[in-house]
Image (cartoon, grey):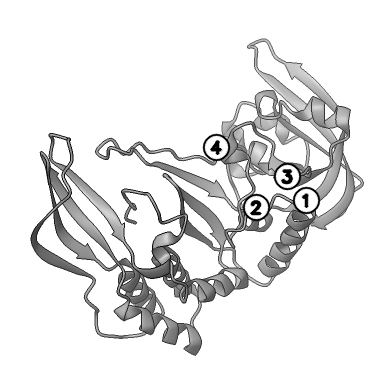
């Protein structure tokens, strides 16, 4: 699989029309990293060389000693090249003999030459698959090799986001085993909200996704019911079809509102869980009557706002235990897809 050697796993949008200006991030899960890597090793840095050319461009050649090979052909050592600014932690890793979990990919994809250091990286068989997102420090708490808080965390398909090194290693082994059963590799985007931020997680389509999706569709949180319904489009079975059909009458909805001056008006109710279930049934080739997925409302005044401009606003309406879920509380908007 060809890929840019370095892909910044961050997509940031500022929704200027909304007062809260929510943040949107795209992150890679440990599941996707395991699926998309050719070799995965538990290792430590034993040597490195920092170099610079006449244009001031810096790179670093790193040698790691393998303690365990979790995926791919075992070798006692691996050598790779990366831009120095992307591997600024290497000296500390060597000095402290830090144990690392390293995700490596083929160093000679078609598009590698587009990078100025692509020719240097291609001198070796393997290279980090995604820059700093390719190395997890197996400390307590574990973290990716970056100082950016939202990118330094380890994200997982099951939303547990472990920080314990032993749990991360076991999760990686389980993810590798699950991915080996699936060919070809397919990708799904799982959307999950944390406070004011929305995280889109890249995950592989495998048995772990199906297992979690089955669990989500029966939970109180409508956000997870929707995501579970979306994910089940990949897995046709009598059990999954029955679960999706039940969601066609799901009562949760998103309120679409318009604001003009101090007046806020609820204009529509959108039944996102129903829509996700219907779309997945269609994708599975199951024909069912289309449910009510959106309905207009008579103009109803809501609590006012000091903003003077007319601003479309959307808020998620919830009932029961779901309204207390930390990922659902306190946000003014949930973006559509």
- Give 134 or 242, whichever is nearer the viewer: 242
Q: CA distance from mark 4 to mark 2?
A: 14 Å
Label ID, residue 8: 4
First in sequence: mark 2 vs mark 3:
2
- Where residue 211 appears, x then y in whole percent? 58, 74
Residue 309, position as x, y percentages in the image: 13, 35
What's the distance in space between the residues labelled 2 and 1, CA to CA? Answer: 16 Å
- Helix, strand or loop at mark 2: helix
Q: Residue at x 44, y 73 (%)?
A: 233
What distance separates the C-alpha of mark 1 from that of mark 3?
Answer: 6 Å
Q: Pointer 3: what residue? A: 142
Number of residues whose C-alpha sits closer than 10 Å to that of mark 4, classed few (under 14), some (14–19) or many (20 or more): some
Asked whether 110 or 261 is in front, the reply is: 261
* Quadrant position of the C terminus in the picture: bottom left
Residue 245 seen in the current view:
yes
Label 1: few (<14), some or many (≥20) within 10 Å?
many
Q: Residues within 10 Å of mark 2 (few under 14, many from 20)?
A: many
In the rendered view, tell whether residue 124 sits above or below residue 179: above
Q: Quadrant of residue 90?
A: top right
Residue named by callout 2: 33
CB atoms at circles 4 and 2 under 8 Å apart?
Answer: no
In the picture as drawn, the residue positioned furthest to the left comes out as 298
Left or right: 209, with 250 as reference point: right
Q: Which residue is mark 1?
A: 165
| Nearer to the camera, 280 or 217 | 217
Which callout, 2 or 1, points at the residue further toward the start of the chain?
A: 2
Label 4: which secondary element? loop
């Amino acid at each position: 699989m060809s890929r840019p050697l370095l892909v910044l796993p961050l997509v940031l949008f500022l929704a200027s029309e909304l007062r809260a200006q929510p943040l949107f991030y795209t992150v890679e899960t440990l599941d996707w990293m395991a699926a998309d890597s050719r070799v995965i090793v538990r290792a430590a840095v034993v040597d490195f060389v920092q170099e610079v050319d006449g244009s001031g461009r810096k790179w670093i050649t790193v040698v790691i000693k393998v303690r365990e090979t979790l995926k791919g052909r075992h070798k006692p050592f691996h050598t790779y090249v990366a831009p120095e600014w992307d591997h600024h932690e290497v000296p500390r890793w060597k000095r402290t003999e830090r144990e690392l979990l390293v995700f490596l990919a083929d160093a000679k994809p078609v598009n590698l030459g587009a990078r100025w250091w692509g020719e240097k990286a291609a001198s070796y068989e393997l290279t980090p698959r995604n820059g700093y997102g390719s190395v997890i420090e197996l400390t307590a708490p574990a973290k990716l090799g970056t100082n950016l808080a939202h990118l330094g965390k380890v994200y997982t398909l099951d939303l547990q986001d472990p920080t314990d090194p032993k749990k991360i290693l076991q999760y990686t082994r389980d993810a590798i085993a699950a991915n080996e059963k699936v060919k070809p590799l397919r990708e799904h985007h799982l959307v999950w909200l944390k406070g004011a931020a929305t995280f889109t997680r890249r995950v592989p389509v495998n048995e772990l996704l199906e297992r979690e999706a089955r669990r989500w569709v029966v939970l109180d949180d409508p956000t997870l019911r929707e995501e579970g319904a979306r994910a089940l489009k990949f897995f046709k079975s009598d059990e999954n079809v029955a679960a999706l059909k039940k969601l066609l009458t799901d009562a949760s909805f998103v309120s679409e509102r318009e604001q003009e001056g101090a007046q806020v008006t609820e204009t529509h109710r959108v039944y996102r869980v129903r829509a996700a279930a219907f779309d997945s049934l269609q994708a599975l080739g199951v024909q069912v009557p289309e449910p009510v997925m959106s309905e207009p409302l008579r103009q109803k005044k809501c609590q006012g706002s000091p903003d003077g401009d007319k601003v479309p606003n959307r808020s998620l309406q919830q009932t029961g235990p779901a309204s207390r879920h930390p990922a659902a509380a306190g946000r003014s908007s949930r973006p559509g897809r």
